[in-house]
Amino acid sequence: MPKIEDLIVGQAATTKELRHLISVVATSASTVLILGETGSGKDVVSRAIHAASKRKGDLVSINCAAIPSELLESELFGHEKGAFTGADTTRKGRFEMAAGGTLFLDEIGDMNIALQSKLLRAIENRTIQRVGGGKDIPVDFRLVCATHQNLEGLVDTGQFRADLYYRINVFPINVPSLAERSVDIPMLIDRIMDQSENIENRPIFDESALTELAKYTWPGNIRELRNVIERATVLFPARNISGKNVRENLLRLKVPNHDEEQNALWEASAGLTGVSGDTEDADATQTPLPHPSHYQQWFAYFDHIDIRRHLSDVEAVLIEAALEKTDGKISSAADALKLRRTTLIEKMKKLMIERPISAHNEEREAS
C-alpha cells in the first residue's frame, strides 16, 4: 500500500498542509469532503486517505457526473433480478463493493436531488436497499466525497440538500490549485514522467523552461500539466526544452472567440499570486493580490485581450466583494477600496451593482 508521501508529491507549504490533514483524518471513521478545482487531484487525495486508513477493504470509486442519473441509483445501491428491463441477475452496488473499505463519491454536487435523499439514509442508517428490493442490507464503508462546485451555493438554490451537505461536510479538505503550489512543478514533472509508458523519449526541461512553467497560471491544474508533459514528449522526444519552447509550443493558447478569451483571462487572473521575480522563496513572498508585472506574460499565451471589458469586470468583482465584506455599508466599502463615497456610488450605478439585501438597514448618512 503506497504512503501519503508517495501519492502527494511536493514541498510547497500548501502541499505539506494537505499531507498533514490527510494523516490526521485517515485513521478515523469520519466522512471527508474533498474540495478543489477541476484537475487538482481530488481522486489522488481519496487514494491517499484510503491508503493511510489501514482499512482492509477496497477503495471503490464512482463519478456521479459521468453516469446518467437514471443509472446512478443502480450503480450505487445495486439491483435485484427483474427490477427493470435488462436486470437479468441480481447485482451488488458500489456500497456493498466497498464493504470494509472506502467509498469515494466524486463530483457529488452533480447527484440529483431525489437520489440525495437515498444517499442520506444510507449514510445515517448504514443500510441500503437494492433497486427492486425491500430488504435492508447492512453496509460497512468509510465515505469520502469530492466536488469542484460550491455546495453551499447549491444548498441556497435548492439543488443540494442541506441535511446531506452537513452530513458529508464533517472533515473538509481543500486541495490547493497548481498555481498555489507552483514550486512543486519540477517534482510533479519527474513523477509524471516516471509513470509514462514512453519514458525512453523523456525530454529535459532546463531552468528557463521550469521558470516559464512556474509563471503559468494552470487553469487545468495537474491534469493540464500532465497533458503538457505528454505534448512535450511528442514534440521534443529526448531533447532539451527551453523557456521559449514552453511559451511557443507547449502553453500557447489560441483563443477562438471573445467569450472564451474572457473566461481564459479570468482563469489566468484567478491563479495570479505572489510577486514576480525569484520563485526560490515563493512561500514567503506570496500575497493574495496579483502583482501588475504578471500581466506582462499574458501575450505569451493570448492573442487578444479586451482590456476595457476585463478591467471593468475586475472593478465590478472588487466592489461587490467590498460590499459583502462590509455588510453593504457603502462608506466602509469605499474606505476598503480607497475611494470617495460618492465615487463608489457612481461606479455602482454605472456597473449596475446593488447592495446586499442585509444592507437595507445601513446607516442613513447624507450623500
Image (cartoon, rainbow, N blue to C red):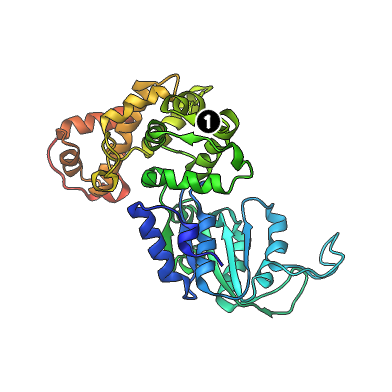
Please indicate whether residue 162 sits to the left or right of residue 279 in the image.
Answer: right
**Of the residues shown, which amino acid type is indicated by label 1?**
Arg
- Which residue lies at the image location 40% right of the left edge and 36% below the top edge? 210
Count of labels shown? 1
Picture coordinates of residue 177, whole percent (x, y): 42, 47
Instruction: Tell me what residue is drawn at x 80 percent, y 70 percent.
Output: 80
Left or right of 16: which side holds 103? right
CA neighbours of label 1 inside 10 A, class few (<14), some (14 to 19), many (20+): some
Q: Is residue 163 visible?
A: no
**For residue 21, above or below residue 44:** below
- Looking at the rendering, in which quadrant would you find the N terminus? bottom right
Against 202, is 150 above or below? below
The residue under label 1 is 239
Among the 4 quarters of the image, the one containing residue 216: top left
Q: Using residue 100 as the reference point, say whether residue 316 is left or right of it.
A: left
* Front residue of this view, candidates 284 and 314: 284
Q: Is residue 15 above or below residue 250?
A: below
Which type of secondary structure does the marked residue at label 1 adopt?
loop
Q: Quadrant of the C terminus?
A: top left
Front one among 71 and 205: 205
Decide which of 349, 271 is in the foreground and name it.
Answer: 271
Q: Nearer the viewer, residue 62 or 224?
A: 224
Residue 192, x across and y down, in percent: 53, 46
